[in-house]
């Protein structure tokens, strides 16, 4: 099995992980291959947990193929109860049976964002009795209402050992992930007046407002103008999904609803018909956000507003897989989610997983072609329309080609001769650390926002966790500057110099991290 560059790096970081760690890998990047290679290198007995039937089936089938059949399954849902050196198990089937896995050296949890960050539930009950290290894998290392999975006092996880989420543009350029294109239809769901409950829009209020036959018919009618091959539609509730599926049939688009009240047989039948191309559209309610693998999906429709960055990212992730003949996946956002939450690799969330009003700027919509573009864009990159803000606004000269992915492109590797650290002060914002890399005649800089909030703080914590020798780890700018010699310096950095400001994309270390 030949691994891609980032899969090799993920396995290497997982092998070095200390405590309970998380590996962040975007949907479609080959997570099961990473799991398989990690198992080969780990050697000791291992348990792979999930509570999603489709994920269990996919993991069992893929790992059996990669590991020459030496894989067992313990799952009531699959009617299999076998334990061995490598066991794929449903947590519902094993959480009362930790005695079966007393020889296990480590537990892997697939889609670990589904695990409660508080010390409750089946996962925590099982793992508390097992007392072995845990590595979680996910594309979204945060949970609505509970925040980043490794930051809370009761969190199962201690750190992020590998994070590939900021490399999505590179993976798209190298052909490992599909490009995303977006349109904001003229018809938009109005969220004004909706209350927030548990961090997201009130479900009961959405049910009352959006499950309306007349309004839904107006939206469905617009689908006829598009010629996409395979669609996924995300709805507010079951009644809404069934209504949309029926209306799609009325305009000649073959569609089937998929939701929690369907029997396993009916759900499997719908997915099989979709895979074969007998059905063009799957209309679902929070079912196809995790564990659903259909690489040839070329259109995602959001008919459900959300403030949940995790749900939003998982929905968009369904379109990231590549397939023969697929140039890109289009996202039709009737719900304003893209403007609300931002690019999937730079989400507008704080450390609690809530919408961050101080996060990266939201996107705007080109009035001509309805494509989502950065707020600062002067010219629409899709149709060339003049979309410049008023003259008083601050402008930049670059614009992302896809509003769902913050743009970046690697250029070349530079050898680092010297590194300097200084305190960066900014009005109305916490201090940060400016790191300057001297590479011959060029100097490249990056900032470590250790005292900030949201993704900037999470990224700083990740870098410190993986580059700081010894304990305790610094939590303030002052603590970092006092002992910055314990922060590992790279020997080479990969830099994109194509934009207005150079962007550091990756680092190489030729000397192992100090103990």
Image (cartoon, rainbow, N blue to C red):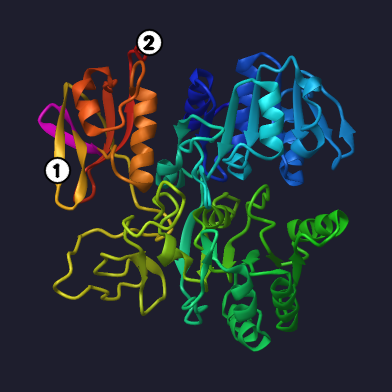
Q: Is residue 445 magenta?
A: yes
Name the quadrant containing residue 405: bottom left
Q: Which residue is mark 1?
A: 425
**Image spot of residue 220 (x, y percent):** 63, 80
**Image spot of residue 383 (x, y percent):** 35, 72
Label 1: few (<14), some (14–19) or many (≥20) C-alpha neighbours in 10 Å: few
Q: Are marks 1 and 2 in contact (CB under 8 Å)?
A: no
Query: What is the magenta segment's predominant secondary structure?
Result: strand
Nearest the camera: 205 or 336? 205
Q: Which residue is mark 2?
A: 515
Mark 1 or mark 2: name the one nearer the start of the chain: 1
Name the quadrant containing residue 276: bottom right
**Image spot of residue 199 (x, y percent):** 51, 59
- The residue furthest right is 79
**Image spot of residue 30 (x, y percent):** 58, 38
Nearest the camera: 403 or 199? 199
Start-end of magenta stretch: 435-447
Which quadrant would the C terminus be assigned to in this image? top left
Which quadrant would the N terminus be assigned to in this image? top right
In the rendered image, the vertical position of residue 147 relative to residue 152, given as above or below: below
Q: Residue at x 40, y 76 (%)?
A: 369
- The residue furthest bottom is 214
């Amino acid at each position: 099995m030949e691994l891609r560059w980032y899969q090799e790096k993920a396995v290497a970081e997982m092998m070095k992980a200390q405590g309970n760690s998380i590996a962040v890998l975007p949907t479609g990047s080959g997570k099961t291959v990473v799991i398989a290679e990690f198992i080969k290198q780990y050697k000791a007995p291992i348990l792979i947990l999930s509570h999603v039937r489709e994920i269990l089936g996919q993991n069992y089938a893929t790992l059996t193929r990669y590991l020459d059949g030496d894989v067992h399954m313990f799952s009531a849902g699959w009617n299999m109860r076998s334990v061995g050196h490598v066991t794929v198990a449903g947590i519902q089937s094993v959480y009362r049976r930790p005695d079966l896995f007393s020889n296990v050296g480590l537990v892997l949890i697939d889609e670990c964002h589904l695990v409660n960050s508080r010390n409750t539930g089946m996962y925590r009950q099982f793992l508390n009795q097992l007392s072995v290290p845990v590595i979680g894998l996910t594309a979204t290392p945060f949970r609505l209402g509970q925040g980043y999975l490794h930051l809370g006092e009761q969190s199962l996880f201690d750190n992020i050992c590998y994070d590939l989420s900021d490399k999505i543009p590179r993976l798209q350029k190298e052909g490992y992930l599909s490009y995303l294109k977006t349109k904001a239809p003229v018809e938009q769901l109005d969220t004004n007046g909706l209350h927030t409950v548990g961090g997201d829009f009130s479900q009961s209020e959405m049910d009352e407002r959006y499950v309306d036959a007349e309004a839904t018919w107006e939206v469905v009618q617009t689908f006829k103008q598009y010629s996409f091959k395979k669609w996924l539609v995300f709805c507010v509730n079951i009644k809404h999904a069934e209504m949309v599926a029926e209306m799609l049939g009325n305009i000649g688009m073959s569609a089937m609803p998929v939701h929690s009240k369907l029997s396993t047989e009916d759900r499997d039948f719908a997915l099989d018909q979709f895979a074969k191309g007998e059905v063009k559209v799957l209309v679902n309610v929070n079912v196809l956000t995790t564990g659903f693998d259909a690489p040839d999906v070329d259109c995602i429709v959001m008919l459900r507003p959300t403030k949940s960055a995790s749900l939003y990212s998982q929905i968009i992730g369904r379109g990231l897989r590549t397939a023969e003949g697929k140039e890109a996946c289009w996202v039709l956002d009737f719900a304003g989610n893209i403007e609300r939450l931002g690019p999937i690799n730079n989400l507008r969330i704080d450390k609690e997983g809530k919408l961050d009003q101080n996060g990266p700027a939201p996107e705007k919509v080109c009035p001509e072609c309805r494509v989502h573009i950065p707020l600062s864009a002067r010219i629409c990159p899709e149709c060339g329309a003049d979309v410049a803000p008023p003259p008083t606004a601050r402008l930049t000269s670059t614009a992302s080609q896809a509003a769902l992915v913050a743009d970046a492109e690697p250029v070349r590797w530079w050898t680092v001769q010297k590194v300097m650290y200084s305190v960066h002060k900014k009005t109305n914002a916490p201090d940060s650390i400016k790191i300057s890399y001297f590479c011959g005649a060029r100097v490249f800089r990056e900032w470590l926002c250790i005292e900030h909030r949201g993704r900037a703080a999470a990224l700083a914590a990740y870098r410190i966790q993986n580059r700081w020798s010894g304990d305790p780890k610094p939590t303030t700018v002052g603590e970092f500057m006092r002992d910055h010699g314990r922060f590992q310096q790279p020997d080479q950095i990969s830099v994109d110099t194509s934009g207005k400001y150079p962007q550091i994309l990756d680092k190489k270390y030729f000397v192992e991290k100090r103990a």
